[in-house]
Image (tube, rainbow, N blue to C red):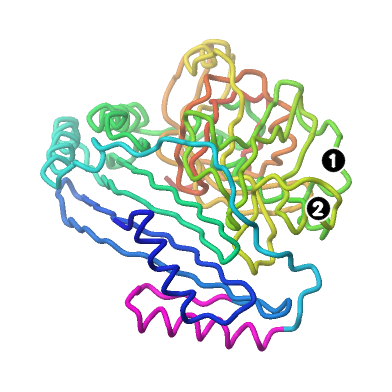
Amino acid sequence: MLPKERCQEIFSEILRYSDADETELLLSGGTHQLTRFANNTIHQNVAEEGYVLSVRTVYGGRTARSTTNRHDPESLRRVVAESASLARQQPADPELLPMPGPQNFRAVERHFEETTAVTPQQRAEAVVRAVQIAEKNGQTAAGTFSTGVGVQAILNSRGLVAYYQDTHAEFSVTMMSPDSSGWAKKTSPDIREIHAESLALRASEIASRSRNPRELPPGDYVAILEPAAVLDLIGFMFFDFSGQGVRDKRSFLTDRLGQKIFGSNIHISDDVYHPLQFGPPFDGEGQNRQAVALVEKGVVNSLTYSRRTAKTMGVEPTGHGFPLPNEWGEAPTNIVVAGDRHTVEEMIASTERGVLVTRFWYIREVDPYRKILTGMTRDGTFYVEDGKIQHGIRNFRFNESLIDLLNSTEMLGVSERASGEESFPMVVPALKVSSFHFTEVTKF
């Protein structure tokens, strides 16, 4: 790993080669170990350590960056020279701000020695237990088990030193039967929160319960969405919570700030300091991240702002900017959707007729302003009647507006750290919605 002191040494070397007005180093990377399995067999075990160094230089309002994955003196000299050459060829940017100076960051502790100590043998043993569950139930298991340590650092010639280190662990498993499948996934900085056997049991149970799926006619149904399904849907709207996006009129929140567009039970914040969240307490420029109440009682109260966007719009920056130069500005990436105390079982028990969805996949945006998405259900879709799961059903394609979805939410579960496949991890609850538009039945 690259400790803070080594990052500072690298930056000092970079400054020796730079004659720019301002110089910035972004450094990211770390170690990553992965055990992959399929067909009830481990077929890959890899480990790597690598870092990306990105140098941005500024000459009289002209800026550009160049990157390398090496940090020997000659590579550092070359990356600085490349950045300088590119910057000098750019037109001057009248809105470019000086780099930020030193910051005081609120501490977040997301580094666990227990995670760093995990061995390939331990990951393999966890996979073996998952495979044994699959074989016992006549299923085929596939998935991944990964662990690692990550580093992010930003240093600049105005004295900024921002450094963050964390650990990460992830277990994902899919159980396949001839005509059904089940899935479960968990991510955490702390390996002690990853219970591979429990996840495998859950995926196996979903696959078993959804065997011999029946066909349900497409249409509008009450829908119970597991947390993974929720995050993969709502993840498509958070790049719209951008001050620059609204300024450029490419956000669905254009002319909607301060309006009630979701149900009164919808509360959404961006909070890197939440105990179930991930990531560093600074943004792509090294600015302090602020906790922001984005939606309160269905009203869009706030957006996120980089330093540049904040100045042009006459507001305070929130610390959500991306590394410069970029065309996107900023976005929230530590989403927390406030939940309630309802369980999925309670949602099922309260449903006269509906559909339970484990997760979605292949989601695409259809209408950016109405926030209509299309996609398909996957790995466990069930018909619910008279408060009970009756049987598995063939998967659906859907067309659904996120605005309508968050206006028809009847029940919310307990918020949890959830992971899907279409969006970044979030803290979200399961949802029961009064109407979800399933448009057609798939072949599986």
Query: Dividing the picture into quarters, in which one does residue 182 lie?
Result: top left
Proximity of marks 1 and 2: CB atoms separated by less than 8 Å: yes
Q: Quick check: 164 above or below 349?
A: below
Whichever of callouts 1 and 2 sits on the residue coming sooner in the sequence is 2
Determine the residue positioned at 24% across, 52% down: 34
From where the camera sits, is residue 183 visible?
Answer: no
Q: Quick check: 69 above or below 215?
A: below
Q: Which mark is residue 257?
A: 1
Determine the residue positioned at 58% across, 88% down: 85
Q: Nearer the viewer, residue 219 or 87?
A: 87
Question: Which range is magenta?
Answer: 65-90
Examine the structure image and report whether residue 275 is included in the region drawn in magenta.
no
The amino acid type, in three-letter code, at marker 2 is Val
**SS state under label 2:** helix
Residue 217 percent location from the top left of the image: 58, 35
Residue farthest to the right?
Answer: 255
Left/right of residue 431 with respect to residue 114 in the rendered view: right
Determine the residue positioned at 22% across, 38% down: 139
Q: Nearer the viewer, residue 289 or 237?
A: 289
Left/right of residue 43 with respect to residue 212 in the rendered view: left
**Which residue corresponds to mark 2?**
246
From where the camera sits, is residue 328 visible?
Answer: yes
